[in-house]
């Protein structure tokens, strides 16, 4: 069963997905939100995905999709190797982001939540890569 916060995020994502594609200027190029999501997904690693997110942020509900793309990219670095306890800790940190602005109104707070979640995933990625002796990408 989904929490109220999860339902709210899902509603925003669905409403954004249902709106016509509008172009935005990102990295000196005109792109749709879907194209930015694809650009994030095509990055070599978590760090570069986060850089695209920061460069293309909307400070509005569209950042939910961008942040989710960063989470997915970063999670590839660490999620398969997490123990049960580490998985629970990760979920707790993500939940803390979800509830941080839950009583605030305005789409900018959805953006703040998306950035919080992406930053948590980025930290976990950095730790995993450091433990494996790899450079962040």
Image (tube, helix red, strand yellow):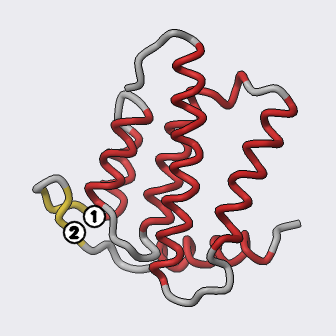
Which comes before the other along the chain, label 1 or label 2? 2
Residue most toward the bottom? 105
Residue toward you, 86 or 26: 86
Callouts 1 and 2 close, C-beta under 8 Å: yes
Quadrant that contains the C terminus: top left
* Residue name at image x 37 percent, y 73 percent: 59
26 to the left or right of 28: right
91 to the left or right of 77: right
Task: Give the residue pinned by disc 2.
Answer: 24
Measured from the top left, where is residue 89 in percent x and y?
Answer: 78, 42
Quadrant that contains the N terminus: bottom right
The answer to which quarter of the image holds residue 25 is bottom left
Asked if residue 34 is positioned above or below residue 109 in the image, the reply reads above
Residue most toward the left? 28
82 to the left or right of 75: right
Task: Give the residue pinned by disc 1.
Answer: 32
Measured from the top left, where is residue 115 in percent x and y?
Answer: 49, 59
Asked if residue 124 is positioned above or below residue 77 in the image, the reply reads below
Give the class, few, some or many, for how many residues have Cα within 10 Å of label 1's Cα (few <14, many ≥20): some
Measured from the top left, where is residue 68 in percent x and y?
Answer: 53, 54
* Residue name at image x 32 percent, y 45 percent: 51
What secondary structure is found at the residue carrying circle 1?
strand
The answer to which quarter of the image holds residue 20 is bottom left
Asked if residue 130 is positioned above or below residue 89 in the image, the reply reads above
* Residue name at image x 57 percent, y 30 percent: 76
Measured from the top left, where is residue 128 in percent x and y?
Answer: 59, 23
């Amino acid at each position: 069963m989904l929490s109220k916060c999860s339902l709210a995020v899902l509603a925003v994502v669905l409403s954004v997905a249902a709106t016509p594609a509008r172009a935005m200027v990102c990295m000196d190029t005109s792109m749709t939100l879907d194209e930015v999501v694809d650009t994030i997904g095509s990055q070599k690693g978590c760090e570069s995905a986060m850089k695209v997110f920061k460069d293309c942020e909307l400070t509005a509900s569209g950042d939910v999709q961008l942040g989710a793309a960063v989470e997915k990219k970063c999670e590839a670095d660490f999620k398969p190797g997490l123990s049960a306890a580490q998985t629970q800790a990760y979920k707790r940190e993500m939940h803390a982001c979800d509830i941080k602005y839950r009583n605030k109104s305005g789409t900018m707070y959805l953006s703040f939540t998306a950035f919080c979640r992406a930053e948590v995933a980025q930290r976990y990625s950095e730790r995993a890569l450091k433990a494996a002796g790899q450079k962040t990408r």
